[in-house]
Amino acid sequence: MKVPYSWLAEWVSMPWQARELGARLTMAGFELEGIEAAAPAFSGVVVGEILSAERHPQADKLQVCKVATGNGEPLQIVCGASNARAGLKSALALVGARLPNDLQIKATKIRGVESSGMLCSAKELGLADTSAGILELPADAPVGKPLRDYLDLDEPVLEIAVTPNRGDAMSVLGIAREVSALAGKPLRGPKIDDPASLQAGNADSKAAPAAAKAAPAAAHAAHAGAVAVHLDAPAGCPTFAGCIVRGVNNRAQSPVWLRERLRRAGVRSISPVVDVTNYVMLELGQPMHAYDLAKLHGDIRARMARQAEPITLLDGKTIELQSDVLVIADEAGAVGMAGVMGGERTAVSAETTDIFFEAAFFTPGAIAGRGRRWGLVTDASQRFERGVDPSQQRRAIARAIGLLRGIAGGNPGPMTFVQSAEHQPLRAAVSLRRSRLNRLLGVEIADARVAATLTALQMRVATTASGWEATPPAHRFDITIEADLIEEVARITGFEGIAEADAIGPHRFRSATEERAGEHVLLEALAMRGYEEAITFAFVDPALQSRLFPGRAGLALSNPIASDLSVMRLSLWPGLIRVAQENQRRQQDRIRLFEHGAKFDVAGSITHEIDSLAAIACGPRLPEQWGLPREVRVPVDFYDVKGDLQALFVATGAPESFVFETPDAPLSCLHPGRAARIVRQGVEVGWLGELHPTLVRELDFTYPPVLFELRLDGLGIRRPRFREFSRFPQVRRDLALVVDESVPLSALAERVTLTASSLLSDLRIFDVYRGSGVEAGRKSVALGLIFQDISRTLTDEDVERLIAAIVADLRVTLKAKIRE
């Protein structure tokens, strides 16, 4: 949220400069994200007055203007703006001026006519993204005064991050309340007249156009005095204030000071009516809406939408509402999604002369998440979702009318105010114990200081025997328990004033034996093999998750931050796949990522949180290098990642206990012929496999990704144990065996290891052959058997006996035979 310093100073006397103010707000819980000047740097621009504007002799769209600078003879300026006219005061860049983007103004000839400077638009000065002509300044602007001084363009603008629980602080008034409490200064603010006092003496409003005085009789008859309002859904809308204003000139231009306030707060000026509603929202924190009165049909109702009820919103999007969405409607149907966005049918335009102002209180529960279903996150919805002041509605309308009358005229009618007393939010008193305050803060704060702090935050404070009872003001939705009050005392008193102290209490540490290693061992092992750690959201895209795991329901979030982050993850793979996609889009061809986090398995009504480790690898097996020609770079495959996993299992201290099995029912998201279930001592601990080819195409991967996921509770990470190595030589024998195609290599290795017992030092599978000389449905596997004894040198006879025993066992158990 952007807050101009001068706007804040209208509401509270500022004891600090902008930089110190930002530091103090940060310590009070509102992080200062930055301070910047109100406009980009430029120099040499002054207020100029156009004395005459004549058509250029060589160009129909150019004018030759005589411009007074307040210092010497008028300058001749060639200008192409359609709004350049005699009597207009505008921004004049003199010769030698420097504008944003390092543009320097020089004397020049344009179509043969001398031009000694430039009349500037708001866009050219960095004051707007677009502009239709040169900047128009008020008639009383002092000619010759530097524009930066006249518009105070060096004013600091604070950008403040407001936490989600502090909706009351999303306004100038909200931040002013905080400054008032921090500095001990009274809150003031501009004078806001009662709307009733504005109804008299408006018949001759000079800003009202003739068309307004001849407004359609039907519209006047339909809403002769006030618009009737009905609260059909008081639980969602317990308060509604409205007021008709007739004779508005919405073609008028908002004054420079108002347009500048809005721009500095990050809002674009549109028209007087819209500018006023935006100004009130930014100042008081109360979102408002204005309807074209002539387009309203009958009474206004705050009701729940009908299922699939259509509405076209101000952004032109037509949506079908759901029955849990609160709407504002007239007799012809919905005219706005309450608290989110108004409807196009009753939108205010340049031709609008009569308007109906709305300022309502919508409960946070009735607004939260509704707009995000259709990708709508508006300034209004952000405030209503967090909670606006339920007592501010009439004041907001009065402020809006007072502003509008000074800009576009208008005759306000009587205010409509409807309220459901039983549905008003109540602020119950919260008890604060002196002992609890001292215990949590670790320091004693004087009773008078505590009471003064809570009072400064506009709470009603009563002293009790054990401490205090404080009733929060209507705008503080976040204060409900004792800890909230303690936090308020701490942050307003100042955390820097609370001395550091050692915690008092028993410290219990987990046993950390040398036998058991931490999970960081696994993460470091992956990092050493070229993987980088990723951290993704625990909530994922339901569409992607359902493609990966069809038929498995994830835990849906009741209030997701976005439609593509609305379910809890069943696996870490959806998040890693999205990250891999983003890396590929940014021209990263070799991707190795892992993540350690929780996944959420839903079984009936119970959700299990499972600590997991997952990884994804895609792209070339090796990085690009001079020793490997680019055209022969081989993509990573199933066996590369299997090798990474086997290296990872070494960290468990028992790598031989992990078995890769061909699954009877493979995961549908994995390639059916390139997937394995990881089992340890008969218990499934994870999966490894290449992404299914269909998903590779759908997700637009250049190379097929290979993924794995492990349950960390099934790994039992232990430090490797020392084993004495033999001083005696090794003996190697190579053995080529023919087995059925269905025999996995792991089964072959397991039988060899069992038969050779402790004398087998290592087993290497160095070749697999299918083809000529081997029967169909069979394969030849070449084993490298390395034998070694810890206590003696093995003889040839010893080795031959072992080979014979191995061949005999394989012939019986796996129907293997020696390949001739």
Image: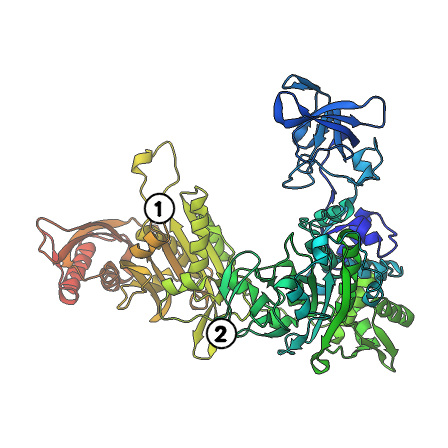
Q: Please identify, in this view, whether the residue under mark 2 or under mark 1 is nearer the observer.
A: 2
SS at circle 1: loop
Residue 170 in the image: state x and y as whole percent: 72, 60
Label 2: few (<14), some (14–19) or many (≥20) C-alpha neighbours in 10 Å: few
Residue 381 sits in quarter? bottom right
Labels 2 and 1 touching (C-beta < 8 A) = no
Q: Is residue 210 left or right of residue 737?
A: right
Query: Is residue 625 visible to us here?
Result: yes
- 75 lies above or below 295: above
- 83 lies above or below 805: above
Q: Is residue 195 left or right of residue 555?
A: right
User: Label 2: which residue?
Assistant: 307
Amino acid beneath label 2: Gln
Query: 533 and 151: which one is in front?
Result: 151
Residue 178 in the image: state x and y as whole percent: 80, 60
The single residue placed furthest to the top in the displayed view is 112
If you read the primary sequence from the N terminus, does the residue marked by circle 2 or circle 1 appear first?
Answer: 2
Distance of label 2 from label 1 (alpha carbons): 43 Å
Query: 530 and 27: which one is in front?
Result: 27
Residue in view at x 84 percent, y 52 percent: 9
Amino acid beneath label 1: Thr
User: Label 1: which residue?
Assistant: 702
SS at circle 2: loop
Query: 538 and 382: which one is in front?
Result: 382
Residue in view at x 34 percent, y 54 percent: 698
- 99 lies above or below 426: above
Query: Is residue 501 visible to us here?
Result: no
Residue 529 in the image: state x and y as whole percent: 43, 48
Instruction: Assign the N terminus to one quadrant of the image.
Output: bottom right
